[in-house]
Image: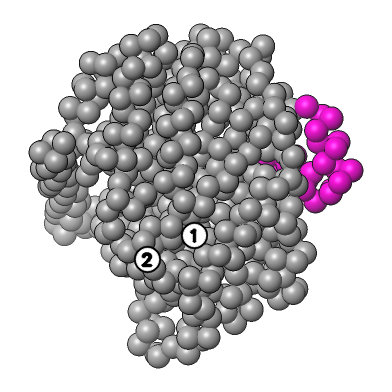
């Protein structure tokens, strides 16, 4: 196995280097061509300047967060040629129109398969109108319903989540769907790989879907061939290739395992050794996840089938009839309400961010948050600080040991503005906290894949589950307080910053939406 891992790593590094060199050369060629025109033609000079101003005005007029628009505006005005080239390739929607059309069509079809039980909404409204409004927001804007009749289980450690997934996979009789940002064909995955082989051989439909960039340092093309050899349908999402591709910036950051439409898992962890502390590249890895069983798994199944079929531009109606028919119900006793949802960068609904802000805006007593990255929009910053200023106990835990040093510096740059408003900030001392959890007032919580940064909130495909009432929010709160005991409060430290640090952080924050 170690030889295979080394070979995969070698192939991955080679592939990354080749793709980076190819794309870099293409960008350089475009830049040289435009620069040559700019330098040797007065008409081209005027056209480029007029085009730059026009694009800046178009960007300014977009209904986007100001923090996302500002770095593009500054870059295009300061360096028109480079700014325009980069914007067309990375910042505009021109290169993703085809995929936007596919997902828009699929979203309409998805809505036809979703049905909100109005009695469930009525029950929540009687208990808490604020919570019912949150549930209604998700259904009316993204088509994802709120369910009852669903059992829930919370994992404060990724290893426990993986162990539970292994047991669930063993029970599969109809299908197993797995969708992950990163899969490593190593010790962690080995716990379930042979079971997947055996299930596929027994006639169970097994599908594995992973993000190519997320897994590029773990897997080579041989992985797909190996899975298919054992009867498993396997795909890599949005493969990195040596041709400039705007859509390549949009990654599948979702993490789901679904068994028979009856049991579903999601959370912060991928299927890789570092997530379960087999390896320790960033100290102790702290993550979280959930298991749901019952009616609500239907939404997760439909989410997987939509992504699987849109990726290949295939009709997914037969898949829905086969794996997610309306007759397939798996009701179990549940003590709360469960609402799985997904977020896409190709629509105009920033679902992940809106769910978080709705919780902040409705909170009365407390909001506790864990996130590996803290790169905030103006709206999110205002929601956090306003909640703290009206007396809500807002606390955030971020890592002490980073996985990305520049992003870590940007994260720390937000501490001061939050601390001035009364938000309490902690860093997880043993290592890297990767859990993405929100919990408020003991009656609502979100566990999923959505980081508090621009990539998760604007660029990636994400998923999460909103929990209301029941015991799960209290379990998330308990885990937060336990994690806080292993963390150091840094609120006061970052109220005092040198001028040099302030300037550096301002520059990093200005261009953080481009990271």
Q: Is residue 91 above or below residue 397?
A: above
Q: Is residue 217 left or right of residue 326?
A: left
Q: Let me know if residue 27 is in the magenta part.
A: no
For residue 283, which quarter of the picture? bottom left
Q: Residue furthest right?
A: 126
Q: Which residues are magenta?
A: 117-138
Q: Is residue 392 above or below residue 456?
A: below
Tag shown at residue 431: 2
Mark 2–mark 1 Cα distance, whole angstroms, equals 13 Å
Q: Quadrant of the C terminus?
A: bottom left
Q: Position of residue 174 (x, y in %)?
A: 49, 14
Q: Residue at x 53, y 47 (%)?
A: 155
Asked if residue 152 can be seen in this view, the reply is yes
Tag shown at residue 61: none
Q: Quadrant of the N terminus?
A: top left
Dot 2 or dot 1: first in sequence order is: 1
Graded by Cα atoms within 10 Å as few (under 14), some (14 to 19) or many (20 or more), the crowding at tag 2 reads many
Q: Main secondary structure of the magenta part?
A: helix
Q: Nearer the viewer, residue 102 or 92?
A: 102
Label 1 element class: loop
**Pointer 2 and pointer 1: residues touching (CB < 8 Å)?**
no
Q: Residue at x 38, y 57 (%)?
A: 285
Q: Position of residue 84 (x, y in %)?
A: 31, 53
Q: Nearer the viewer, residue 203 or 52?
A: 203
Q: Which residue is mark 1?
A: 371
Q: Is residue 307 above or below residue 365?
A: above
Q: Is residue 478 left or right of residue 390?
A: left
Label 2 element class: strand
């Amino acid at each position: 196995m170690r030889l295979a891992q080394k070979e995969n790593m070698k192939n991955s590094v080679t592939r990354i280097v080749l793709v980076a060199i190819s794309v870099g050369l293409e960008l350089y060629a475009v830049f040289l061509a435009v620069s040559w025109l700019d330098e040797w033609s007065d008409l081209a000079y005027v056209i480029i300047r007029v085009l730059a101003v026009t694009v800046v005005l178009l960007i300014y007029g977009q209904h986007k967060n100001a923090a996302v628009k500002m770095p593009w505006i500054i870059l295009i005005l300061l360096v028109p040629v480079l700014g325009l080239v980069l914007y067309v390739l990375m910042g505009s929607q021109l290169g993703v129109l085809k995929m936007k059309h596919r997902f828009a069509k699929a979203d309409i079809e998805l809505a036809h398969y979703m049905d909100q039980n109005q009695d469930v909404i009525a029950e929540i409204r009687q208990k808490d109108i604020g919570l019912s409004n949150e549930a209604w927001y998700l259904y009316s804007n993204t088509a994802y319903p709120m369910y009852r009749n669903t059992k829930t289980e919370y994992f404060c450690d990724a290893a426990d989540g993986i162990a539970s997934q292994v047991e669930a996979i063993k029970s599969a009789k109809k299908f197993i769907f797995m969708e992950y940002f990163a899969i490593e064909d190593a010790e962690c995955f080995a716990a379930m790989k042979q079971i997947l082989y055996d299930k596929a051989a027994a006639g169970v439909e097994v599908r594995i879907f992973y993000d190519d960039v997320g897994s590029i340092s773990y897997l080579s093309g041989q992985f797909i061939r190996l899975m298919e050899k054992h009867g498993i349908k396997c795909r890599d999402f949005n493969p990195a290739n040596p041709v400039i591709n705007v859509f390549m910036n949009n990654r599948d950051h979702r993490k789901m395992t679904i068994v028979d439409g009856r049991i579903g898992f999601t959370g912060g962890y991928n299927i890789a050794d570092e997530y379960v502390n087999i390896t320790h590249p960033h100290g102790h890895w702290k993550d979280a996840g959930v298991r749901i069983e019952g009616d609500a798994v239907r939404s997760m199944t439909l989410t997987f089938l939509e992504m699987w079929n849109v990726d290949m531009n295939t009709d997914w109606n037969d898949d829905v009839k086969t794996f997610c028919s309306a007759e397939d119900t798996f009701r179990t006793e549940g003590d709360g309400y469960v609402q799985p949802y997904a977020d896409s960068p190709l629509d105009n609904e920033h679902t992940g961010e809106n769910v978080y802000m709705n919780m902040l805006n409705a909170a009365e007593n407390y909001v506790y948050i864990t996130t590996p990255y803290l790169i905030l929009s103006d709206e999110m910053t205002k929601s956090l600080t306003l909640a703290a200023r009206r007396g809500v106990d807002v606390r955030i835990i971020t890592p002490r040991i980073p996985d990305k040093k520049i992003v870590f510096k940007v994260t720390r740059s937000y501490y001061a503005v939050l601390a001035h408003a009364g938000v309490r900030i902690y860093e997880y001392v043993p290592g890297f906290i990767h859990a993405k959890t929100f919990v408020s007032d003991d009656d609502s919580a979100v566990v999923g894949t959505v980081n508090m940064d621009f990539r998760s909130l604007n660029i990636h495909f994400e998923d999460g589950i909103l929990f209301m009432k029941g015991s799960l929010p209290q379990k998330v709160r308990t885990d937060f307080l336990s994690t806080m005991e292993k963390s150091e409060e840094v609120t006061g430290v970052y109220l005092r910053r040198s001028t040099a640090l302030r300037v550096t952080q301002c520059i990093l924050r200005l261009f953080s939406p481009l990271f």
